[in-house]
Image (cartoon, rainbow, N blue to C red):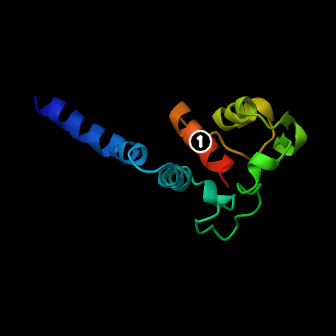
Amino acid sequence: MKKLLIFFQIGILFFAPLAQATGTSNTEAAHTIIREKACLSCHIVPGLLPAPQAGIAPLFEGLAKRKRLVGGLLTNTPKNLRRWLKNPKAIKSMTLMPNTALTDEEIEILIEFMNSL
């Protein structure tokens, strides 16, 4: 019984931030994901303070207006953006973009957020 209680407590600690994120507005949820996945290390995101080296990767702002993604490799469609966010190295093996292990739900939140900028 103690093991089950410990497992439950660990689960609450692990999943509570995600539950909080999904219970907030899309912008707040996206900001939470962006902070947790360290996107600000390379990207500049409106409304969030960037890290000193941010700006080495594309801006989130204006993404919806771009015709191409990944340095011109992909047409800017939701499907291609999902593929890129899910596994960047499968699209461009030498990319500096890490696989941040985004869930499908997190990807949808980010796409909606980025397309609103």
Image label count: 1
Taking the image as drawn, is residue 101 in sight?
no
Q: State which quadrant residue 107 falls in.
A: top right
Q: Provide the residue designation for mark 1.
A: 100
Quadrant (top left, top right, bottom left, bottom right) of the C terminus: bottom right
Up the image or down, 76 lies above or below 24; here it is above
Quadrant (top left, top right, bottom left, bottom right) of the N terminus: top left
Up the image or down, 54 lies above or below 72; here it is below
Find residue 83 and report its horizontal and vertical position in percent. Answer: 70, 30
Taking the image as drawn, is residue 77 in sight?
yes
Q: State which quadrant residue 52 falls in.
A: bottom right
Answer with left or right where residue 47 lies relative to residue 8: right
Find residue 45 and report its horizontal and vertical position in percent. Answer: 65, 60
Q: Amino acid at mark 1?
A: Thr
Disc 1, SS:
loop
Up the image or down, 51 lies above or below 99; here it is below
Binning the other alpha carbons within 10 Å of mark 1 as few (below 14), some (14 to 19) or many (20 upward) gives some
Q: Residue at x 29, y 37 (%)?
A: 11
Answer with left or right where residue 8 lies relative to residue 56: left
